[in-house]
Image: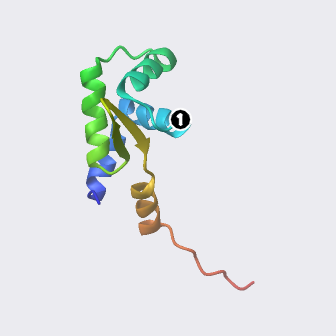
Amino acid sequence: MADVGDVFKALADPTRRHILDELAERDDQTLFEICARLGTKHQFTSSRQAVSQHLELLEAAGLVRTRREGRYKFHTLDTRPLAQIAERWIRDKPQENP
């Protein structure tokens, strides 16, 4: 599992957050599909290489999983690192008696 700092670093960039938004909306996307959706919905003009580098950082942070099918690489959102962060600081507080 990636370091919590890696997760925060990955989330700090707006382009990476948009990529995660797109994967949250629809998993199992190729680089080409992600680039097309970013261009259409967010008017991003980033190169495929730039988006690929963002995806690599997201994968290193544990926020994206990949699988290969032939020559295609599919990307899927993995929210487990976010859950671990939430669990670290969000706890059930004991109820106070009136």
Q: Quadrant of the N terminus?
A: bottom left
Q: Which residue lies furthest to the bottom in this view?
A: 97
- Secondary structure under the numbered disc 1 in the rendered image: loop
Classify 63 as above or below 74: below
Q: Which residue is pictured at 39% across the width and 17% down the height?
A: 44
Q: Picture coordinates of residue 10 (x, y %)? A: 31, 43
Q: Quadrant of the C terminus?
A: bottom right
Residue receiving disc 1: 26
Relative depth, front residue between 23 and 10: 23
Classify 3 as above or below 17: below
Q: Picture coordinates of residue 85 (x, y %)? A: 41, 61
The amino acid beneath tag 1 is Arg
Q: Is residue 27 left or right of residue 65?
A: right
Q: Residue furthest front?
A: 70
Relative depth, front residue between 91 and 33: 33
Classify 88 as above or below 54: below
Classify 76 as above or below 33: below
Q: Which residue is pictured at 26% across the width and 38% down the height?
A: 56
